[in-house]
Amino acid sequence: MLTIEWSASEGWQAPLIKPFGNLSLHPACSSLHYAIQLFEGLKAFRGVDNQLRLFRPMLNMKRMSDTAKRACLPAFDQSEFLECIRRLVKIDQDWVPHSDSASLYIRPTFLGTEQSLGVKKAANALLYVILCPVGSYFNSQTDGLSLWADPKYTRAWKGGTGNYKMGGNYGCSLFAQYEAEDHGCQQVLWLYGEDHQITEAGTMNIFLHWINEDGEEELATPPLDGIILPGVTRQSILELTGKWNLHIPCQDKDSQLSSRIAKELTDIQHGRTPSDWTFLV
Amino acid sequence: MLTIEWSASEGWQAPLIKPFGNLSLHPACSSLHYAIQLFEGLKAFRGVDNQLRLFRPMLNMKRMSDTAKRACLPAFDQSEFLECIRRLVKIDQDWVPHSDSASLYIRPTFLGTEQSLGVKKAANALLYVILCPVGSYFNSQTDGLSLWADPKYTRAWKGGTGNYKMGGNYGCSLFAQYEAEDHGCQQVLWLYGEDHQITEAGTMNIFLHWINEDGEEELATPPLDGIILPGVTRQSILELTGKWNLHIPCQDKDSQLSSRIAKELTDIQHGRTPSDWTFLV
């Protein structure tokens, strides 16, 4: 794992890559009491050429940096941090699966480690990265996911932190997630406002693929208006499909568009399509 | 400090009172990534009779239990947990200040300690309590606090967790707190909705003491409608003043009512007024 410590008096310390092990945290640590914490999630893919690739990692660095600012955690050098991650993945490269349907999940985490109980900016912080081979997030064997929407729960609100990847957004969503499962669904579809606007699903952004009132095929997603997490996949789908003629002949199954998008993305991730969206490890 | 571990397979383990020291936490610990965490705050006061008293601690136990349910953390026996806290304070009784303006702060904390990165109910949890002698929360030498209100930030929303004492409510408030300080104020006054309803201040509930439109003296506080933290002091002030004739002659200074309330509360806390609101250590 990679760890980098920061203190208000000394600034950033030298990054360390060391064996995976427990963290030793003061019981008053501000990440444990006031959720002064944030994370990112990205993946390393093994390509058809056996090269390891990250997918648009600077978008994660940018979002992490934006979230750190919102959490009153210190600024860090995004390119330097990505270089640390690259070296960590290089060392642990044998853990990147030889598979088209699995990858090495990379979890950068940033904690306030202030050792006192006042609600204030952390004078100490810890940036660290752990890795884990992963398959699909969902166990589902089916083509889709079932979503459960109940306006009695709200994930995020304007003036809050729903558009940042702060830990607090997730802990408060858990209760509704289990209510969804009690109703036989896999994820929550979060609604917003009195007119029940569709915002995002439990762990992902959403797209709607439909024939609109003018009879045109349309791909729609909620705008980034302050309550939506700006997903890297979301942005990539918008950029990809923006170049396509979306008047794809609509067959009996809607999944053709999602299959086409998934194929384009995984072809890039696994090196079958050359792209400047990949970052070689 | 007091620690009590829980696991889904073994249930609650025996409580331990042991020397204060760092926690050893797995780097994927769910309290560090998804803010599956909550806390309480209460105080032990040294009375004029040298007895140690907690103030209405079962209200804290109840709120902690309610918050644990919202955070999908396991239920605990509220009375048993209070008995553990009583024994901890008894052992550390020399740390309770001999002072009318200071006390021993008690911080019960409850963390999800699940050791995996999926967003789910924690299969492991840690309940712990640390202690710390404290004076007044604010350094201010003045009678009042200056509040800063800007509708661009929102603390809590209906359908969220603002009425529970979860860590996520605090981390997301920090940015606005520093904006308040940049404007020369001590705390944020949180507004809600398009009509900018007054809700609560940074670390406390609020009361308005005013002469209403009918010329009557009135004490008002926002109702517990799902976005307000149900404070123990808030509830105690409502119960105390409910017995009073609030048509106290209004003098040049509004602080007479707050002084009267503060005196009643501290008289109970320090044993000058016998009351079933105290719990002897």
Image (cartoon, coloured by chain):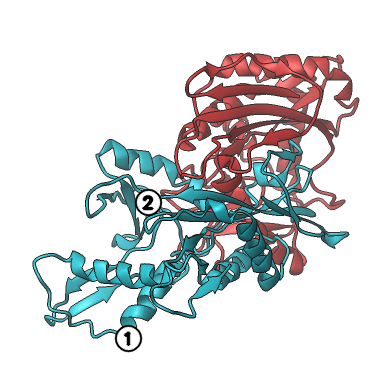
Chain colours: A cyan, B red
Which residue is found at the position 55% from the left and 53% from the top?
Answer: A94
Relative to B86, A194 lies left or right: left
Which residue is found at the position 43% from the left and 65% from the top?
Answer: A228
Relative to A211, A235 lies left or right: right
Q: What residue is shown with label 2?
A: A136
Does the CB distance between marks 2 and 1 fall below 8 Å?
Answer: no
Query: Can residue A149 be seen at all in this image of the molecule?
Result: yes
Chain-order first, disc 2 or disc 1: 2
Of circles 2 and 1, the one toward us is 2
Image quarter of residue A191: bottom left
Query: Relative to A238, is B36 above or below?
Result: above
Give me the C-alpha separation between circle 2 and circle 1. 28 Å
Farthest residue, direction left: A252
Q: Nearer the viewer, residue A125 or B235?
A: A125
Q: Nearer the viewer, residue B235 or A215?
A: A215
Residue A243 numbered mark, or none: 1
Query: Can residue B241 be seen at all in this image of the molecule?
Result: no
The amino acid type, in three-letter code, at marker 2 is Ser
Image quarter of residue B84: top right
**Mark 1 nearby-residue class (10 Å; few <14, some 14–19, many ≥20):** few
The amino acid type, in three-letter code, at marker 1 is Lys
User: Residue B232 location in percent, x, y?
Assistant: 62, 33
User: Residue A121 location in percent, x, y?
Assistant: 74, 56
Mark 2 and mark 1, same subunit? yes
Mark 1: which secondary structure? Answer: loop
Locate the C terminus of chain B by quadrant. Answer: top right
Image quarter of residue A258: bottom left
